[in-house]
Image: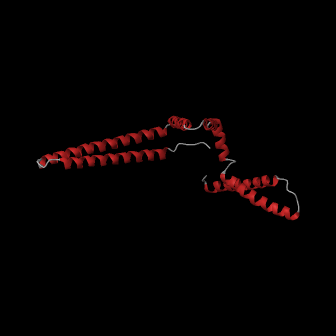
Amino acid sequence: MAERLNTKASEKYNSRNLERSGDERRKELEAKRNEALEQRSPEKSVSERSKEAQELARSHEKESRKEQEDKLAYEKRREQLSRQPRSQKAAFNKEMKRVQSQLSAPSKAFSKVIHNPAIEKVSNVTGSTIARPNAILSGSVAAFFLTGSLYAWASYAGHPLSGFESIAAFIIGWLIGIIFDYTRIMATGKR
């Protein structure tokens, strides 16, 4: 199956990082302010101290406002990029190259083969039609139980098995799973 970038998760992650860095910066500024207040000489007047406090508050306010503006600009840009299919494709290709650069040579070659657009499309069509998870699961369960019961009956009756019984049981279970899956989709409208 094709890997997809989860832009909402990456936006949330980047937003959290911005908030975290903003919180760290605020703590640093508070520590600097407290340090400055402790190092002040007692000769300073109240008006000088209030001026210093106001200057610190203004600088803190300017920095927090700038952080907010940067955050809003970043989110706006991410939103614009997420709406453009070309940029999504470019971001996907860039991420694929980054990930593939970290792989070993055989893994990189395999990744390039399976992420070929033609192979991805065939894989997506196959995954949404014949290789549905419910169909594979029901085929496996049916193969296990039908083959087990058939083997028990054959050993009791003394008949030899040909080996096709497991394949036939899987096909029967797969058909039951596909019918169930598509009936459920038609009834609920959810995939």
Quarter holding the N terminus?
top right
Residue 36 x %, y %: 21, 46
Which color mode does the image show?
secondary structure
Q: Among all residues in the image, which is located at the extreme right? A: 158
Residue in view at x 59 percent, y 37 percent: 104
**As drawn, is 32 to the left or to the right of 189?**
left
Residue 15 x %, y %: 41, 46
The part of the image, by quadrant, that contains residue 137 is bottom right
Say which of 38 and 160 sits in front.
Answer: 38
Say which of 15 and 152 sits in front.
Answer: 152
**As drawn, is 81 to the left or to the right of 137?**
left
Residue 86 x %, y %: 52, 34
Residue in view at x 64 percent, y 57 percent: 187
**As drawn, is 38 to the left or to the right of 90?**
left
Residue in view at x 75 percent, y 54 percent: 170
Say which of 133 and 37 sits in front.
Answer: 37
Residue in view at x 74 percent, y 53 percent: 175
Residue 105 x %, y %: 61, 35
**As drawn, is 89 to the left or to the right of 169?**
left
Rendered position, 144 above or below 97: below
Rendered position, 123 above or below 180: above
